[in-house]
Amino acid sequence: MTEFSQALRVDLTEDREETRRFLVLRRFFRSPTFVAGFAIVVMLVLLGTGGVWLSPYEATGMDLRNRLSPPTAQNWFGTDNFGRDVFTRVAAGSQLSMFVGLMVVAINAVAGAAIGALAGYLRQLDNLLMRVMDAFMAFPAMLLAIAITAALGPSLFNVVVALAVAYVPKTARIVRGTALIVREQQYVEAAQVAGAGTMRILRVHVLPNCLSSLVVQLTFVFASAVLAEATLSYLGVGLPPPAPTWGNGISDGREYIVEAWWISLFPGLAITFAVLGFNFLGDGLRDVLDPHLPGESE
Amino acid sequence: MTSYIARRLLAAVPVLLLVSLLAFLLMQIVPGDPAHAMAGSDASVEEINELRRGLGLDRPWHLRLAEWYLALLQGDLGHSYTLRADVTDLIFERIPITLSIAIYSMLIAVPFSIVLGVLAARFRGSALDLGIMGAALLGVSVPNFWIGIMAILFFSVQLGWLPAGGYVPPSESVIGWLQSMTMPALVLGTMQMGLLTRITRSEMLEMMHKDFVRTARAKGASELRVMMAHALRNAIIPIVTVIGLLFGMIVTGAVVVEQVFSVPGLGRLIVQAILTRDYPLIQGTLLFVASAFVFVNLIVDLSYAFFDPRIRQN
């Protein structure tokens, strides 16, 4: 510990910025929930990349002579009704889930931050923007996503669009809440008096201060998007069947639940694991970044 | 209080207007048009044209929007093409089934999670707290359709205790009804329990550090009284909010759970409408659910005033 703190002291004199980042990181890694979440997410990424690469099977490659095989040394998670390797499909499903999650989070980050910051900082826009968001939020998020994919048709792009539309209003509302507080701060007033333009104030003062609540919200959006994507697949409005999504896997196994429980079991465990990981990550981030934010993850 | 209720009711009007507009627009974003999608790929041009006339899609959109609102004011949500019945009638047929699963699951979830949340808060940092919080996080992370399938595997296939699905109306057999509803209600309750336990714990923790709790302890009130009459009494408002918010989750959950257990409720109607591309039915059911959601939120807001007299003042 003494060695460590000495190293720290040397750092302080050498490079303040780097030390500050290091200290923030150290605070994250002190939170057990953050570490657990981080570990799970790393494992999922490894599963999605390494698992698919290592597996001798194709996610959609059928082998009808080897249908409904229980877990063996060759097929770790068994095979499904088409003789496809369940492990390879779960690994490939991890790629799909992560991709959908990342896209939904990216759209949420841009649109949610823009709408939220504008509504929170510019009072003229607040009422209009937030009433529109309220109308979207009047639909349960999942149901809105189901409705949009039902209207647009099932595809990867439409699933991302539907989930983004479903979660942006809540993200915007959370950013707006923080922006409302920031705009009353004296440094914002000082910037206004100094003649800074609206865009500059939004960019330099409002948005950076909304960042921590935004990041926490985005982790929960990621968790929700993974869960919602699986649900859409299961209901038949997500990615259409040959795609190895986790939801499709569970849905495939539904008919064979008595004789081949492994088809549904493993994708379900994967979803639980992934969502749990992002919830942990969100809880950990919130504890460190935003100790006063109320606990909630829908 | 009356003026408070009136103000809240008025504030719900623009939201409902926008919600109904969104439900109308849903039908307009279908690529091609709904007649094409509903008729399927092997339909002739005449069939599609007839369907289009039947749906009124051959008329300009502003006329259709006006008619949509005129019909809504009369409680008319349109006509289902696949089920050949009025959407309103179909919805009201299904409501009691979904509502009974919802109430059943809340009767299980609410008391359980409040007790668990209070216990976790009271014994913060103990193994009990860790166990409860771990289970609660698992509850919000696990996909309910998967839990449903696994529950069927365990309770129906392995143990043979409960039916794997289907619905028995209470008029036929009360026991059969209870048996058919138990698994769906439990599965629907898992996520609610997870969420509500977490909220109860964090609200209780906040209240336990307040001065009035210390005062209650100092004057010698029993621990049970301190927790229930002082801490929980003040933590109840956020908890009630979450119970209200759970409504949205219950509706989405019902869509999934009714599908898994083949229960002919409102959720199954929505999925059926989507899979058969019955757009008037999709539109009508969604609008109904969203309006119900708005009203539940309204009731939640009004209940704050009931639980906390300070809110009535401003």
Image (cartoon, coloured by chain):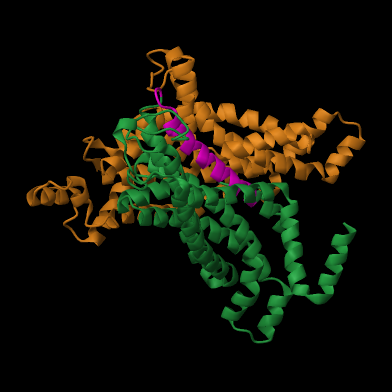
Chain colours: A green, B orange
Tell me the quarter of the picture where residue A203 sits.
bottom right
Residue A139 in view: no
* On screen, residue A194 above or below B159: below
Image-based side of A137 in relation to B72, left or right: right
User: In this view, which residue lies farthest toward the bottom?
Assistant: A195
Image-based side of A192 in relation to B213, left or right: left
Image-based side of A264 in relation to A290, left or right: left
By secondary structure, the bulk of the magenta-drawn segment is best described as: helix
Please report the bounds of the magenta region as a residue range. Answer: A258-282
Q: Which x, y percent locates residue B118?
A: 73, 34
Please name whichever residue, A134 or A277, is drawn nearer the observer in this view of the structure.
Answer: A277
* On screen, residue B194 above or below A124: above
* On screen, residue A136 above or below B42: below
Q: Which x, y percent locates residue B155?
A: 49, 19
Residue A171 in view: yes
Residue B156 located within the stretch drawn in magenta: no
Q: Which x, y percent locates residue B280?
A: 27, 45
Please name whichever residue, B188 or A173, is drawn nearer the observer in this view of the structure.
Answer: B188
Q: Residue at x 25, y 57 (%)?
A: B31
Q: Which x, y percent locates residue A226?
A: 49, 48
Q: Residue at x 74, y 31 (%)?
A: B128
What is the tally of numbered marks visible in this picture? 0
Residue A264 located within the stretch drawn in magenta: yes
Q: Residue at x 36, y 46 (%)?
A: A243
